[in-house]
Image (cartoon, helix red, strand yellow):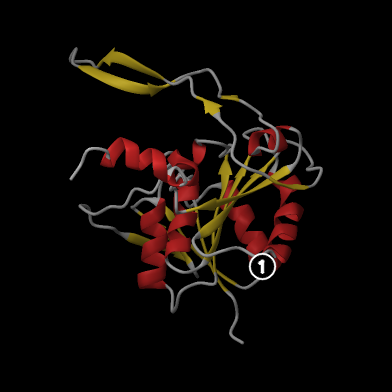
Amino acid sequence: MSERLILLSNDDGAWSPGLASLARVAAGFGRVVIVAPDRNRSAISSALSLHDILRVQELGPDRYACTGTPVDCVLLGIRALLPRTPDWVLSGVNHGFNLGEDVFYSGTVGAAFEGCMQGARAAAFSLDPDGEMDLIEPWLRRFLERWETMPMPSHRIWNVNFPKGEPRGFQLTGQDNRTYHDMVERRLDPRRDPYYWIGGDMGPTYARSAGSDAEAALAGQVSLTPLRLDMACPEVMAQREAFDAAFRGGLP
């Protein structure tokens, strides 16, 4: 059997400490190839550069920096740089949680989903912004030792969030709800022309619902959340009679 091939990416950039930590751990499981953005690309989700050229800088053996997005990096790695589709695509470790609705904005999660769509087993990893990489590396190793034994349907990824201190264990979780407090601030440049800045000083507010990723991670657990590409709503799909009444009633 050939050596396991592992592609690593992230959205914090090719020189981030989280990526270095992930590479150290992943190296114990196969050949690691890093293709990561050449700058911070946080909150860019699954953006794909369809109208820009991509340039790649070789930083060392099996290590590349790309001018594109996290999804660009994964796609370019699989389609242009690797000899075959990797067995694993691992994204992170992100500086800051990706809990609840964060997954729709996260470039870390976007890279993992792209790996999944390209046929690899994929996972996204994130850490409390005040967390310590040294504390989570043994737990990251434990996850990688065991995740292939956990049955997972196709077109699914794992979203893994590590807590601030020494983890108390693993917990299978659903998604929480998060309230954002971002502001759109209008400013003036030196020529007195307006520009806008999206941000905010207030941190997120999580519902911390029972069994959710936020509840687990904020209580010191490593939250393991299975996410799927199919976002269809089964509750509405089951309401066939209501649909017929609303959309087909009175039609010939």
The answer to whether 241 appears left or right of 131 in the picture is: left
Residue at x 23% of width, y 57% of height: 53
Q: How many labels does the image show?
A: 1
Q: Residue furthest bottom?
A: 1
Q: Is residue 160 left or right of residue 240?
A: right
Front-lying residue, 61 or 240:
240
Work out whether 196 lies above or below 120: above
Residue in the image at 69% along x and 64% along y: 150
Residue placed most toward the observer, 233 or 204: 233
Q: Which residue is drawn at 40% across and 58% down?
A: 73
Residue 157 drawn at (x, y percent): 55, 56
Describe the element under mark 1 as helix, strand or loop: helix
Quarter in which the C terminus is drawn: top left
Packing grade of label 1 (10 A; few <14, some 14-19, many >=20) is few
The foreground one among 180 and 236 is 236
Indicate the quadrant containing the N terminus: top left, top right, bottom left or bottom right: bottom right
Q: Mark 1 points at which residue?
A: 148
Q: In this view, does 80 lie to the left or right of 209?
A: left
Counting from the top left corner in percent of width and height, residue 4 is at 59, 76
Of all residues shown, which one is farthest toward the right? 168
Q: In this picture, is 115 found above or below 48?
A: below
Q: Name the residue rendered at 28%, 52% in the picture.
A: 49
Residue 34 position, x and y percent, is 50, 62
In which quadrant of the rendered view does residue 185 lie?
Answer: top left
Give the percent coordinates (x, y) of residue 19: 56, 52
Q: What's the amino acid at mark 1? A: Glu
